[in-house]
Amino acid sequence: MCGITGTIDLHGTGPVDTSALDAMTDRLLHRGPDSTGRFVEGGVGLGFRRLAIVGLEGGEQPIRNEDGSVVLVCNGEIFNHRELRAELEAKGHRFRTPTDVEVLVHLYEEHGTALLDRLNGQFAFALHDMRRGRTFLARDPMGILPLYYTCTDRHFVFGSEIKAVLEHPGVERRVDLTGLDQVLTFPGTISPRTLFRGISGLQNGHYLLVENGEVATHAYWDLDYPLLDDEPAALSDEEYLETLGGLLEQSVRRRLQADVPVGYYLSGGLDSSLIGALVHRVGAAATPHSFSISFGEEAIDESRYQQLMAARLGSRHHETVFRPTDIASGLRRMVWHAECPVKETYNTCSMVLSAAVRASGTRVVLTGEGADELFGGYLGYRFDLSGRRTGGDPFEDEVRRTLWGDPEIFYERDYNAWRETKLDLYAPDVRDAFSEVDCLTEPVVDPRMLRGRHPLHQRSYLDFKLRLTDHLLSDHGDRMALAHSVEARYPFLDPDVVRFATTMPPRLMVTEDTEKYALKAIARDLLPPEIVQREKFGFRAQGSPALLRQDIEWVEDLLSYDRIKRQGYFDPDVVEHLKRQYRQPGYEVHPHLGDDLLLTVLTFGLLLDAFALPDNA
């Protein structure tokens, strides 16, 4: 994993401000501590920070094609690079480096932007074609790697993280109130929206072309489930399970490709345990390291199951004990990396985990994200089996029609009723302008991908787009791993696995009493029954009530009446009420059914400070 940046003069006349480009690139040192590089020609500048994983020697970027007319900076990995390299060499292409991503420049020569259809990987890249005078940027289908961009008066500016984009002198620092409203409404922001007005996130499965002063966005992939009246595939249940098991094993094998040590996270749940078992089955080159976190608090601790799996697999296991005081010590840095306020504190745990990975000498870690969203891992999937929750409230029906194109699709909550809670929390000026801020007045997904699909597939699509891509993979995954220069890889999100999962009948995903039925069936021969039969236990840590009880000076200052009033985003009287409520003995925010509003207010305050964002004047 690495970091990329760039500026393009949309008028095509001015020279590149190399000091600005270097400042943008240096801001991503944590993503690539091993080396740096840049390309500058005419009005185009590309910057690169490298985290060396494949081809440790001679893998510097930018990378060029044979005649130097195509230039690439890439953040990510191409897991099918060996097959692609052999094919391209057979066609006469000459490779200059041992890295996996060099295939991109030669694939571009052969296929143009259609090269994206040939890749199995996780990536965000920028490729400049000097002959055509255009720049081609893309983000992988699953959205594992981030890419942000904006346009100033004359420049197109991009970077792997928003903090790099903000280093460009032409980029203003402003809060996007609709982005904040998304955080309060959904699991997090939804690309292209961010918390920074004017700065967009490239959506998963999309690419950009910057050409002749114009910026155009194109979709090349989406999670496409079959229509209800499509003919089912002629496979038996056993054939589905056997094929899925083989694809997962192949995916793990691909993601063990590296010239540095590869380990895996071990939460004690089904998904990470299955990945760990497959790592050992395919025969890692050396005994891999496994990593877990424990809390010393029975209600949220999974160490018994983590230790059970580590002993079963024979890994070199590292357990980190996380205390409530660790939340406060890591919260400020976590928000700086996440670039977004949060409703849960578990990102601080993830950041501690990646520190343990790095300290062990491991640079790549496999993790289990994606299994819940693709294989029916949340309680809501069983809820859908009990029958559709139809509308009835005309206002709620209208919200669902706007968001999903269908008033009978229920996802997570009644959003119209939740509006009132948000309105109470906002400052009077935000409340008065709420019609311009409200994130419920525009679609957040493509309704065509929901229409005519099975309810389980509808929920899976929404989980994928609203929860996984820009929250679990971005602020929780990519950012927390790269905070310590660690690359995270996701075997459940292999394109072949995802493609096959969309063809599997819903009955193999969820039954009346079992989530992730298919994965549990595969795991029975690989894992102890204590793991396979466990109820889902979400990864979580203590919330804002635990922080308030520590009487931390900077927390009190960030949530003080005067500061909240001066900033002008939230109502200070409502924040005071929440503080009194959260301080009550024994009070806790339910980890799955409640929203930790005070933590959102607190981490939003940290965001304002970290990025010097202005008050809402």
Image (cartoon, grey):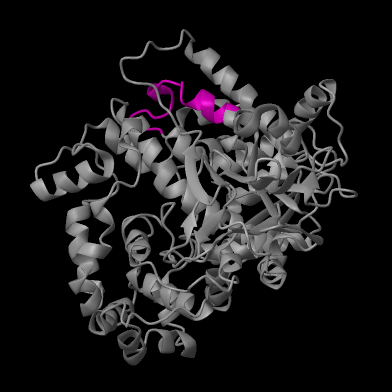
At 50% from the left edge and 60% from the top edge, which residue is drawn? 150
Count of marks overlaid on the render: 0
Image spot of residue 11 (x, y percent): 56, 58
One can see residue 28 in this view: yes
Foreground pick, 221 / 307: 221
Residue 511 lies within the magenta run: yes
Image spot of residue 280 (x, y percent): 74, 36
| Left-right relation of 521 to 581 | right
One can see residue 249 in this view: no
Foreground pick, 273 / 72: 72
- Considering every residue shown, the one lying at the far right of the view is 57
**Residue 390, quarter of the rendered image:** top left
Q: Taking 596 as reference, is 549 above or below it?
A: below
Q: Taking 559 as reference, is 374 above or below it?
A: above
- Considering every residue shown, the one lying at the far front of the view is 13
At 51% from the left edge and 43% from the top edge, which residue is drawn? 204
Residue bounds of the magenta highlight: 496-514
Q: Taking 300 as reference, is 63 above or below it?
A: above
